[in-house]
Amino acid sequence: MKIAVLGTGSAGITSVCHLCAWLPAGVEIHSIHDPNIPIIGVGESSTPFFVQTLEFAVDFNLLTDLHHLDATLKHSTRFTNWRHTEFDNPLFGGNSAIHFNNFKLKDFVFSRLTTKWPDKFKEIHRNVVNLTQDKQKVYVETTQDILEYDYVMDARGFPKNYDNYFTSKSTPVNSAIVYNKNTPGDWNYTKHIAHENGWMFGLPLQDRQSYGYLYNSNITNEKDAHIDMQKILNANFKIEDCARYNFKSFYAKKVFEGRIIKNGNRALFFEPLSALSLYLYFLINRLFTDYIKKDTTQKDLNFNFLEIADAVDSVIAFIYHGGSKYDSKFWQQTVEKTNKVLVNNEKFLEIKQNLQENFVKQTPYNAKSWIFDPKSLYILDHYLGYNYFST
């Protein structure tokens, strides 16, 4: 069996890693990409699943390999200005994650994949122009030739149109300004800093600090966002020196059709709150691996993806719907929007009842999880001031 993975962003790289590590001998995994097409390359906050995948696929070692990725350890997410007292939502179960430089991920991973999986992994430099399929094969048309595969994972970035996608009901931001401060970061958590126009992430890397100011361009213009970002960071920098993005949050109605499965931004995009998109990348890999091993069907795979993607959308609403310490136009509209998402949300009401019952029984960690594990949910619930799950 031959499987191609298209794209070398974080989704494409971790997909290759997952398939190499969890599929049996005899399966070939090819990474097809054009090295002249750059990735977005924003410094990234990860999850324990990301570290676990690298550990299995390329023997990544948290003690000796961090420098290969300019990486720092991540033990929690710190929420500042969401409430009048900042708080941490830690990683539990002995887990650790990392912040990493996405520009360095491919070279590090591919050099090790070539050594560890010489009969399984192959890198192919091609510019893909089209995909077609029949019942037996997928045909990858490039500028040089046509390659045949049993399955293709398409992680080439954002789709050309959104006709076959659901739009997030919860996400209130649609724009970002990303600024890199050329000073090493010296903290071990991902910063989530609320401001009057949205919120800002802060990531520590070994060679720099990466900040992303997220806002809604229908409420705040880029000039005002830039001014506010400079004020928060106490730094003077030109907007031209920053990366700027406009985006929408979405997820595919069908992530797997025929012999082509989507991943990365081709499958979904959620704002970077608590690295929730990265969680879904790993879910797709896990479900696809189960499908190849004949442990699930394509119908069930699509159903499970939609169920979890909808849960991610609801978790975003859960975090936002209590607002922040700012009583601004952005936060007023956000509270109104996200409260509507949670009202009569069956999955949220089910999780709420289950966590309450287990809290009363004093067995809270036997409760169901909802993207986050039960302990993280109890902490978020407490520090965000909701107390849904403990009363």
Image: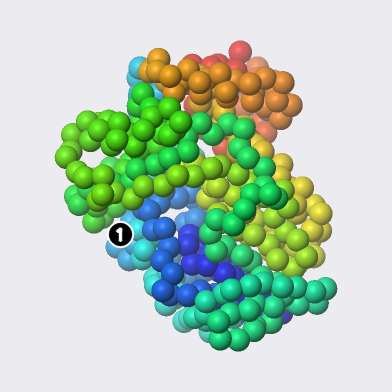
Q: Is residue 18 above or below residue 189?
A: below
Q: Residue at x 30, y 31 (%)?
A: 224
Residue 4: horizontal and vertical position, in percent? Answer: 62, 74
Residue 262 or residue 217, whichever sits in front: 217
Residue 259: horizontal and vertical position, in percent? Answer: 74, 68
Residue 158 or residue 293, whichever sits in front: 158
Quadrant containing the N terminus is: bottom right
Residue 105: horizontal and vertical position, in percent? Answer: 40, 65
Residue 329: horizontal and vertical position, in percent? Answer: 43, 19
In the image, taking residue 374 as reference, residue 59 lies left or right, namely: left
* Quadrant assignment, res 121: bottom right
Secondary structure of the residue carrying tag 1 is loop
Label 1 is placed on what type of residue? Asp
Q: Residue at x 30, y 59 (%)?
A: 70
* Quadrant assignment, res 351: top right
Residue 171 or residue 224, whichever sits in front: 224
Query: On the image, numbered disc 1 is attached to which residue?
Result: 70
Q: Residue at x 64, y 60 (%)?
A: 262
Q: Is residue 293 above or below residue 357?
A: below
In the image, taking residue 289 as reference, residue 198 lies left or right, namely: left
